[in-house]
Amino acid sequence: MTTGSRIFLVGFSGTGKSAVGRRVARLLGWDFVDQDEYIVERAGKAVERIFADEGEEGFRRREREATEQLSTRDKVVVSGGGGVMLQEECRSSMLDAGLVVTMDARPETIFARLTAAVGDEGAEGMARPMLAAEGDPMERIESLKRGRQWAYALAHWTIPTDGLSVEQAAHEVVRTWRRIGRAATWKSDPLLAASVTVEAGIYPVMVGWDIILDQLGDRMVAAGVTGRAFIICDSNVVHPYGRAAQRSVHKAGLEVGLFTFPAGEASKTLGTAGVIYEWLAERRVERRDAIVAVGGGVVGDLAGFVAATYLRGIKLVQVPTSLTAMVDSSIGGKTAVDLPAAKNLVGAFYHPEFVLTDVSALTTLPARALREGWAEALKHGLALDADLVDIYESRADALLALEPELTAEVVARNTAVKARIVTEDERETSGLRMLLNYGHTMGHGVEAAAGYNAYLHGEAVAVGMTGAARLGLAFGVTPAELVERQAALLKRFGLPESYTGIEPEAILEAMSRDKKVSAGQVSWVFLEDVGRSGIHRGVPQNLIGQTVRELRG
């Protein structure tokens, strides 16, 4: 596709699509079309009448027709309906035809804007139904927005409009249009699960079942990798995935090398990184070359750290093969190695060219390794996406059996959650990204106190989630029924809720060295509702100590 002659603004009501769209059109000298007004004009009746006469399906059919028609016009800015991205046909048409930008805002901002819009000419019809609906309007906004966020995350770009004037937001759209160029060509890819927008640009996360590794080499060439490829993997995945990646890259015409290190967290050190540096130096690696991380979280973290620091940065491709890496660690650019004092103390933010996820790799994991991966997926749902929690509870058996279509869908939805958070808070400056650390404060303490060998990462996180839920309950934040609901989920997915063989004081000492400590205080992520969490400080140390001791099995 080319982004040259069409811009589609999508997002929730109250995010500024129409006002910003009109200003963008004036800045570019293009036409502006409000999609809902376009539908009303052609139907000859109001949206409410369309719903009354034809039902929601009738309106959605008209929405698809309008999207198809507008996707053929040149030099046009389109303000899409709030649900247009939920329809696959509409989404594909827009992504193929032009630049799609999600206008985003916090629920509180949306509520304030919709409240102010009631009574304003041209806005009342949009705002009043949302505010007048039965129940708490803020809860309705939060629920609807949360359910649609996965689709909004698939846009080429996201612009948070909180605090921006219409003029400022419009100029952000124009700047995006001018610089994004051909970077959106992969948006029509059927494997695309999410796109991550960061300061350096955007990159895709592609998810599929039993097809990805055959395509790795060709996708690297398409992404502009013109030099050599250096695959880094561990002893657990070199057969079959490291070798399969090597064959794919070689088949695409790229020169390829392969480095393997002993599997396990104990290898994620500056010492191992130094050995890899020497290996790369012997091969005279250049900046046009690329590192390909094939494996789980340890491989992704270590190989990413090497890519970020060797020659001050060379290209990186992430090919995750564990569930933890697929849904979490391969996305977002966090790369690091451990020190004896604590995990991930030496690292860098460094993003890949793309992430390529073959979910079928999960079928070759040992049972314990697969179970621990579900901890990160459950974390995403409990802390950030209530709809995912519903899927975990209702389809647990199918997920544990790795039913291909469902498992690929759930992995893709998890990547969209992670991508959205990273896009909105790349370097943890606003605190939003810290919500991804739910369960990790105590979990990292368990890992460190156990010497990084007794507990897998997800197992420690599961213990940490249990501790955080109990601590949140005692702190007056987490509802008791949610603590029980989480416990049932952890048990259903075979994850631990307690630890053994570690002294509680060792865990507390390790937690005090965690990188989330500021001014001697630990920042805690507590569940406030299903799919909603917040950051809390000032938790009494005696309460933390009591909770850690009670978790000892």
Image: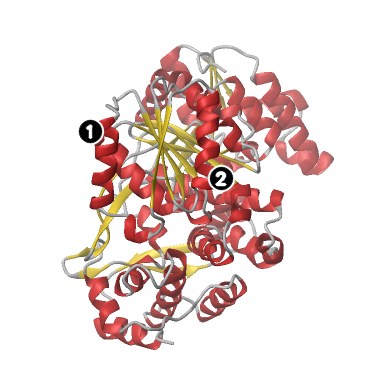
* Circle 1 residue: 312
Which secondary structure, mark 2?
helix
The mark nearer the N terminus, 1 or 2, is: 2
Q: Is residue 537 above or below residue 263?
A: below
Q: Is residue 104 above or below residue 17?
A: below
* Circle 2 residue: 240
For the residue pair 231 and 411, the one nearer the viewer reads as 231
Q: Estimate the x, y position of residue 17 in percent, counting from the top left.
A: 50, 33
Seen at 65% across and 42% down, the residue is 210
Q: Estimate the x, y position of residue 82 in percent, counting from the top left.
A: 60, 40
Q: Estimate the x, y position of residue 322 in percent, counting from the top left.
A: 52, 53
Which secondary structure, mark 1?
helix
Q: The residue under label 2 is which amino acid type?
A: Pro
For the residue pair 163 and 463, the one nearer the viewer reads as 463
Whether residue 194 is visible to the viewer of this picture, yes or no, is: no
User: Could you give the CA–CA distance between mark 1 and mark 2, rounded to whole angstroms?
Assistant: 31 Å
